[in-house]
Image (cartoon, rainbow, N blue to C red):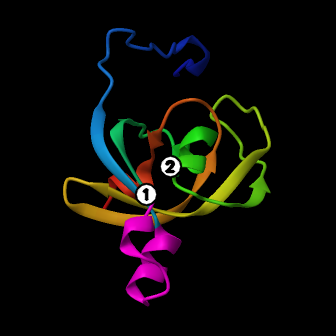
Amino acid sequence: MLDFNRIQHKVNKNAAEIRVKVKLTNSIDEGLISRGYLNPTDLHVYQTTALADTSSVRAVIPMHVAQKLGLQIRSERLPKYVDGKQLTVEIAEPVLIEIQRRETSEDALVVGDEILIGQIALEL
């Protein structure tokens, strides 16, 4: 008989973080430009490196990045974290995420102080 209570999960503290170059663009700006309602020079873009976080489903951006991108907060959600915690986070307007010439658009969670790229964007 297997004793599952004796199984211990080990965390590899030496595992390397995976960082990717990412270009974030305000999706609403891009749509307004393509329709001729906004000057292309007014497009909000932010380029940086971000942590590829396979334990996150969605992208996470800090408030200062949301502000640089000119994103409005659309709503709040109460996501459940892996450790069981639940904290209210804000949801921004859609952001276009470009990684290695592939792109997707999603509403980002606005929380923390680091950009995290989750499973949705990584599965481009």
> In the figure, residue 87 lies in which quadrant?
top right
Residue labelled with disc 2: 59
User: Residue at image x 52%, y 15%?
Assistant: 7
User: Residue at image x 75%, y 32%?
Assistant: 85
Q: Is the Cβ of the residue at disc 2 closer than 8 Å to that at disc 1?
A: yes
Answer yes or no: is residue 62 visible: no
User: Residue at image x 78%, y 38%?
Assistant: 86
Residue labelled with disc 1: 120
At mark 1, the secondary structure is helix
Question: Camera-side residue: 110 or 63?
Answer: 63
User: Residue at image x 32%, y 9%?
Assistant: 14
Extent of the magenta region: 27-44
**Picture coordinates of residue 21 (x, y %)?**
27, 41
In this view, 36 is above or below 64: below
Which amino acid type is shown beneath numbered disc 1?
A: Ile
Q: Residues within 10 Å of mark 2 (few under 14, many from 20)?
A: many
Give the mark toward the camera: 2 or 1.
Answer: 2
* Left or right relative to 115: residue 16: left
**Picture coordinates of residue 13 (x, y %)?**
39, 9
**Picture coordinates of residue 22 (x, y %)?**
32, 47
